Image (cartoon, rainbow, N blue to C red):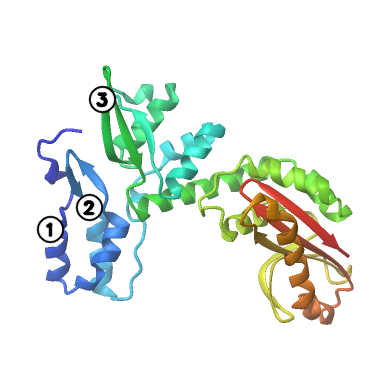
C-alpha cells in the first residue's frame, strides 16, 4: 500500500525488457507479462522477480521451454487451501468471479497479524492480498475504511488457485458417499441423477468459466471411484471420441457411454442433452467396444448450464 521504494519489490517493465533483450528473448515479452506481471506496489506495477529469473534461465537453456508456476514451489499455499475449505456459497461465487478474470471489493486492514488470519473471512481476503495471491486494481475511501478492488495478478497465480481447488475437490470426493449417483446411473434414474449431480455442482468452484472442460473434470472426478467400473476419458471409438466411458470387466460386458455438452441457456438444456445423446448414436461410439467383447450398452446425454443439468438416456 506504501509508495516508498515501490519499484524495488520486483522487476519493472523496463527492467524486464532489458533482461529479455540481454538474452535474446524479446519474443517472450508477452508470455512473461501474462504469467508473471501484475503486482502493484503503491502505483508501481512490477513482475515477480523469482519467477522471471527462473523462466529466463529455462528459456536460455531451451527456447521451447514452457512457463511454469515457479512461485508455487516456494510456498505451501495453505492460505488458498484454507479459504477454499471454509468457502460458503458467497465465497465460491467470488472465487469463480476472480478465476474468470473478474474482481471483488474488500475492506483492507494492514494491521492483521498471523494469529488473526482465520478469525474472519475479510482477514483471509486481506492476507491473500498482502501475500501476493491477489492484486489491487483500485481503491476507494468510505468513512474511515479503505476498500480495495482485487483481482488475480497473472496466469501463474491463477494456476495456483486452480490446482489447489483440484486437490481439494479430489480429496473431498474420497470422503463423500456417492452411492446415490452410482445407483442412479446403473438404474437409469435420470431425475435422481440430475438432482445428485446438481447438488454436487453447488459445492464445487468453477475455474473454466463453465466450459465443457470444467464439467468433464467434475463428472470424471465423481465417477472414478465407482466400484466395478473403469473410467476412460476421450477415448477413440467409432467415428470419434466419447467424453466418458464407464467399463466393467470385459467378461461382464457392460459399458456406459456418456457425452457432455454445455447449454447456452437454461431453456436449452433439454435440446442440448438430446443432441449429446444423438451424437453417441451418429458417431457409433460403441462400435470398437463391441470388438472387445462388450454387449450391454447404456447411453447418456448430459447437458449442463452453470450449476444445473439435464440427463437423458437410451439403452
Residue at 63% of width from left, 40% of height from top?
202
Sequence-first tag of 1 and 2:
1
- Front residue of this view, candidates 77 and 41: 41
Disc 3: CA contacts within 10 A as few (<14), some (14-19) or many (>=20): few
Q: Nearer the viewer, mark 3 or mark 2?
A: 3
Q: Position of residue 197 (x, y in %)?
A: 72, 47
Q: Tell me: residue 123, above or below residue 308.
A: above
Disc 2: CA contacts within 10 A as few (<14), some (14-19) or many (>=20): many
Q: Are marks 1 and 2 in contact (CB under 8 Å)?
A: yes
Q: Position of residue 31 (x, y in %)?
A: 30, 65
Among the 4 quarters of the image, the one containing residue 227: bottom right
Residue at 29% of width from left, 35% of height from top?
130
Q: Confirm whether residue 304 shows in the render.
A: yes
Sequence-first tag of 3 and 2:
2
Which residue is label 3 attached to? Answer: 141
User: Which image quadrant: the N terminus?
Assistant: top left
Which residue is label 1 attached to? Answer: 15
Q: Confirm whether residue 245 shows in the render.
A: no
Residue at 77% of width from left, 77% of height from top?
282
Q: Tell me: residue 121, above or below residue 17.
A: above
Q: Point out the residue furthest to the front here.
A: 267
Q: Are marks 3 and 2 in contact (CB under 8 Å)?
A: no
Q: Are marks 3 and 1 in contact (CB under 8 Å)?
A: no
Residue at 51% of width from left, 39% of height from top?
93
Name the disc covering residue 47, or none.
2
Q: CA distance from mark 1 to mark 2?
A: 9 Å
- Left or right: 207, with 113 as reference point: right
- Left or right: 195, with 261 as reference point: right
Q: Nearer the viewer, mark 3 or mark 1?
A: 3
Q: Secondary structure at mark 1?
A: helix
Sequence-first tag of 3 and 1:
1
Amino acid at each position: 500500500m506504501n509508495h516508498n521504494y515501490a519499484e524495488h519489490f520486483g522487476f519493472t517493465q523496463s527492467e524486464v525488457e532489458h533482461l529479455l533483450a540481454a538474452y535474446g528473448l524479446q519474443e517472450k515479452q508477452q508470455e512473461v507479462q501474462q504469467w508473471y506481471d501484475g503486482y502493484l506496489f503503491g502505483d508501481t506495477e512490477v513482475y515477480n522477480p523469482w519467477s522471471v529469473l527462473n523462466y529466463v534461465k529455462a528459456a536460455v537453456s531451451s527456447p521451447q521451454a514452457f512457463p511454469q508456476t515457479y512461485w508455487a514451489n516456494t510456498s505451501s499455499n495453505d492460505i488458498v487451501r484454507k479459504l477454499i475449505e471454509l468457502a460458503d456459497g458467497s465465497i465460491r461465487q467470488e472465487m469463480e468471479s476472480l478465476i474468470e478474470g473478474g474482481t471483488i471489493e474488500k475492506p483492507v486492514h494492514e494491521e492483521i497479524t498471523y494469529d488473526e488470519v482465520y478469525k474472519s473471512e475479510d482477514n483471509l481476503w486481506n492476507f491473500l492480498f498482502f501475500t501476493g495471491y491477489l492484486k489491487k486494481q483500485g481503491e476507494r475511501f468510505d468513512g474511515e475504511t479503505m476498500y480495495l478492488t482485487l483481482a488475480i495478478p497473472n496466469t501463474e497465480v491463477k494456476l495456483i488457485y486452480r490446482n489447489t481447488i483440484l486437490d481439494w475437490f479430489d480429496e473431498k470426493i474420497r470422503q463423500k458417499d456417492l452411492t446415490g449417483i452410482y445407483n442412479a446411473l446403473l438404474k437409469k434414474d435420470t431425475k435422481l441423477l440430475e438432482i445428485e449431480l446438481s447438488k454436487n455442482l453447488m459445492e464445487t468452484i468453477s475455474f473454466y468459466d463453465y466450459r465443457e472442460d470444467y464439467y468433464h473434470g467434475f463428472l470424471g472426478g465423481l465417477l472414478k471411484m465407482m466400484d466395478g467400473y473403469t473410467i476412460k476419458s476421450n477415448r477413440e471409438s467409432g467415428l470419434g471420441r466419447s467424453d466418458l466411458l464407464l467399463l466393467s470387466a470385459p467378461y461382464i460386458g457392460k459399458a456406459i457411454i456418456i457425452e457432455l455438452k454445455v447449454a447456452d441457456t437454461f431453456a436449452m438444456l433439454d435440446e442440448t442433452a438430446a443432441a449429446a445423446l444423438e451424437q453417441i448414436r451418429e458417431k457409433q461410439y460403441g462400435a470398437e467396444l463391441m470388438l472387445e467383447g462388450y454387449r450391454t450398452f447404456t447411453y447418456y446425454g448430459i447437458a449442463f448450464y452453470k450449476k444445473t443439468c439435464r440427463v437423458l438416456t437410451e439403452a
